[in-house]
Image (cartoon, rainbow, N blue to C red):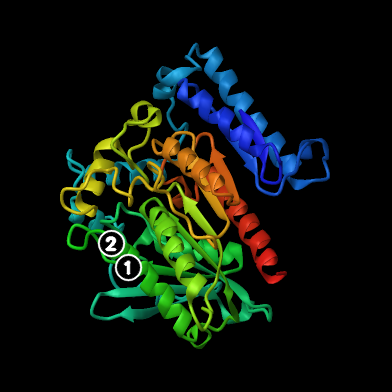
Amino acid sequence: MVVTGGLNLLKDCHAWYVEALREKGKLVTVVECPNATHVFYAFPELVDSDKFVEDMKLFIDEHTRSKHGKQEMGGFDGARRRRPSSLPWTVRIQHAIVAFAHRRDGSIRRPILSLAGLIKVGTTSCLRPSSEVRCTDITINVSLGIWARVFSASASDLINTPLPVVVYFHGGGFVAFSPSSRPYDALCRRLCRELGAVIVCVNYRHAPHHRFPAAYDDGVAALRFLNNTRLADLVPAPIDLSCCFLAGDSSGGNMVHHVAQRWASMSETAWPPLRLRLAGAVLIQPFFGGEERTGAELALDKACRILSVARADHYWKVFLPDGATRDHPAAHVCGGDGFELAETFPPAMVVTGGLDLLKDWHARYVKALRGKGKLVAVVEYPNATHGFYAFPELADSDKFVEDLKIFIDEHTRSKRNR
């Protein structure tokens, strides 16, 4: 277990050490407290000090049980034995449905997801009354089918201080789900309540009918729409477009990188200046990849029923241009010497899980961002599989929302104080 702080001058050395351990096949849990300086843990009056003790207890308890159970602790053999422990039955059922909906080659039986309410088209849930959150569906481009669902506080909860805006790109391997899918409607309502922000969840075009770069184009189109539209006319809450965050999970996390890069590049030369300015980028278990099989992909292929290597390969096959390999820059974002990053690329928060087969790609991405001098907060949940954040029954899902709120609050203050 390696503990570091976002304000610790040694954090790059910590990242190199973690990478070296993982290259040797060792299991490593990384706990980064974004606002922590060196020796923060010695001051019990700090919130991060309490969180550190909680994380350390989780680590010790887990590996105490593992040791007593005579399970191997180190290397990929030990990792293969790791499974999410004691998942609630509701989560297990949803995992099973998603697994059954996938064919062996990774393609999807859409009717199964539709029957389970995991794919849902329409505005019925948006019309559902709520005492805390209201939502509005807005059309961005009729001909392309781009639209968004805007979640805001109900009128009774409004405050005078302008709220940050979080533009959210949903996951689904570039092929499934929408803002009206049950998991994402529920997740965005929860984020709206607990973050104190306006959430704009974007519906973008899906592969295989719309391959690269359609999803990225749609993401930029959504930002253009928000930049040129009075969003305040659509929602009752006062908003601050100069304090906008991009967030997304899995394939949506991949979109966050590419859309943020495009928007940041545009903002450097735009005149008049763009109203919508990025305060942060939140990549939640981002869907990156390459032709290489990483240690985590080999070790954790069966750790979660949500995502496997075969499914990931299928998603890339139908999304990338015909004939492209997984080393295409859309997937292998920091491959080779060609990793480009706009000067104004925003501070990033990268969320990963100890049981996520993509975690090695996440570590490489963090290293690449830091190599460009960018601020990166890394949050790793040791027992989390891919997609854990969508299940409020899980304790790590609650911790994720807390950590996300800390990041957004910190960078909202930072943006407004400039």
Task: Give the quarter of the image for residue 124.
Answer: bottom left
Q: Is residue 29 visible?
A: no
Which residue, as the protein is rendered here, is positioned at the far top?
A: 70
In this orientation, does residue 151 appear? yes
Per the image, label 1 sits on a secondary structure element best described as helix
Instruction: Point out residue 297 in the picture as x, y percentages from the top left corner.
Output: 35, 32
- Who's the residue at 33% across and 69% down the image? 218
Residue 43 pos. (x, y %):
83, 40
> Disc 2 marks which amino acid?
Pro
Give the numbered dot on residue 269.
none
Give me the residue at 35% from left, 45% from top: 332
Image position, residue 372 (x, y; %): 54, 49
Circle 1 residue: 217
Q: Quadrant of the N terminus?
A: top right
Tell me the amino acid under the disc marked 1.
Asp
Say which residue label 2 marks.
Answer: 213
Q: Are marks 1 and 2 in contact (CB under 8 Å)?
A: yes
Secondary element under disc 2, as helix, strand or loop, is loop
Cα–Cα span, label 1 and label 2: 6 Å
